């Protein structure tokens, strides 16, 4: 067998995607991401995306409403960041994004910005207004250029 | 936040699927599965499936040919098992299956038999005669009842 097969494989930059509207499906993914980041001393990024369709047409004409939605998203992400730090993860980065389709934002912006080697996502994480129906985890598992774990 | 978010999440039974015909796509998945199984003292199952279409119609009429193919598959799996043991994994189980479509065999037989809590698969692992084209990893990520990591 190859010598290469002897080498451990350890992830150094772990990106967790959270659905700010669906705490339930995020819990196990959060716990796994924290466990790995803590045990392997990895960087942890916690990302969520504000979908443009979350803002209705009336609110979209009111800059203060958009700004308020953005602040709400940041607050939720920061709660996860604080909990991760309480769990002993040393290096945690909050990542709040908005606009566009969630899959595309993660693939075209979040991944190139944070440069993870592992993406952690809940199995049931759905974004109700995504143009593609169903959970995003398996879709990211297919399309992302890095390792993806779908947590159940 | 929930108290539950403080709990580590650790996998105890890790199932690695290997493509006996495609060593390359299996190497990183093997390394990750060994790393996790070693570091968390988890059980490791190493599974491969002999596709019925791998046997041509002439060979299928010759029991000794089928038997030979089955032995070849077992030899390959046992090489991975031995390497995993050399890597310090204490509890490794070889799992050789045959017949049917690979996805279905894994979902209906290998998972119910081994009862993994994590399935580890290479991103490019393809089974050329599978009725569905493309890599099996993302499809298992969608359909499996347990966590799935697609390794790149």
Image (spheres, coloured by chain):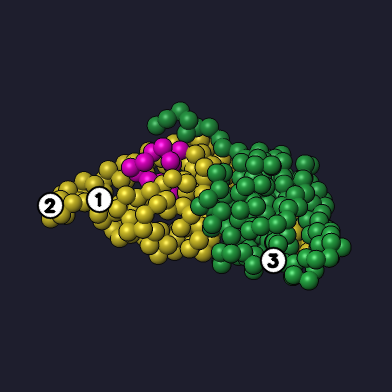
Chain colours: A yellow, B green
Q: Position of residue B66 (x, y in %)?
A: 81, 62
Residue A1 highlighted magenta (yes or no):
no
How many marks the image carries: the answer is 3
Q: In which quarter of the image is residue B145?
A: top right
Q: Mark 2 lies on which chain?
A: A
Q: Is residue A116 left or right of residue A69?
A: right
Residue placed furthest toward the front: B61
Residue at 72% across / 47% down in the picture?
B45
Residue at 25% across / 54% down in the picture?
A53
Q: Mark 1 lies on which chain?
A: A
Mark 2 element type:
loop
Query: Which residue occupies the foreground of this view, B141 or B1?
Result: B141
Q: Do labels 2 and 3 share a chain?
A: no
Span of residues in magenta:
A16-27
Q: Which mark is residue A54?
A: 1
Quadrant holding the C terminus of chain B: bottom right
Mark 1 element type:
helix
- Find disc 3 in the rendering and name its residue: B53
Query: Which residue occupies the foreground of this view, A68 or B112?
Result: B112
Q: Where is residue A83 in the image (x, y as percent from the top left)?
A: 44, 36
Residue at 64% across / 51% down in the picture?
B106
Residue A20 highlighted magenta (yes or no):
yes
Q: Where is residue A90 in the image (x, y as percent from the top left)?
A: 51, 43
Query: Which residue occupies the foreground of this view, B70 or B9?
Result: B70
Question: Of circles 3 and 1, which is in front?
Answer: 3
Q: Distance between the residues labelled 2 and 3?
A: 58 Å
- Find disc 2 in the rendering and name its residue: A58
Q: Which chain carries label 3?
A: B
Residue at 45% across / 60% down in the picture?
A111
Q: Do labels 3 and 1 share a chain?
A: no
């Amino acid at each position: 067998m190859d010598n290469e097969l002897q080498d451990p494989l350890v992830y150094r930059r772990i990106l967790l995607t959270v659905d700010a509207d669906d705490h339930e499906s995020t819990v196990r993914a959060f716990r796994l991401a924290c466990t790995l980041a803590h045990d392997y001393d990895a960087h942890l990024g916690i990302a969520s995306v504000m979908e443009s369709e979350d803002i209705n047409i009336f609110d979209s004409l009111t800059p203060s409403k958009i700004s308020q939605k953005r602040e709400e998203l940041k607050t939720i992400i920061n709660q996860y960041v604080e909990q991760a730090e309480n769990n002993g993860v040393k290096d945690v980065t909050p990542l709040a994004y908005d606009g566009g389709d969630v899959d595309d934002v993660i693939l075209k912006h979040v991944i190139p910005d944070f440069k993870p080697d592992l993406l952690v996502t809940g199995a049931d994480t759905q974004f109700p207004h995504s143009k593609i129906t169903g959970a995003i985890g398996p879709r990211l598992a297919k399309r992302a250029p890095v390792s993806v774990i779908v947590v159940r």
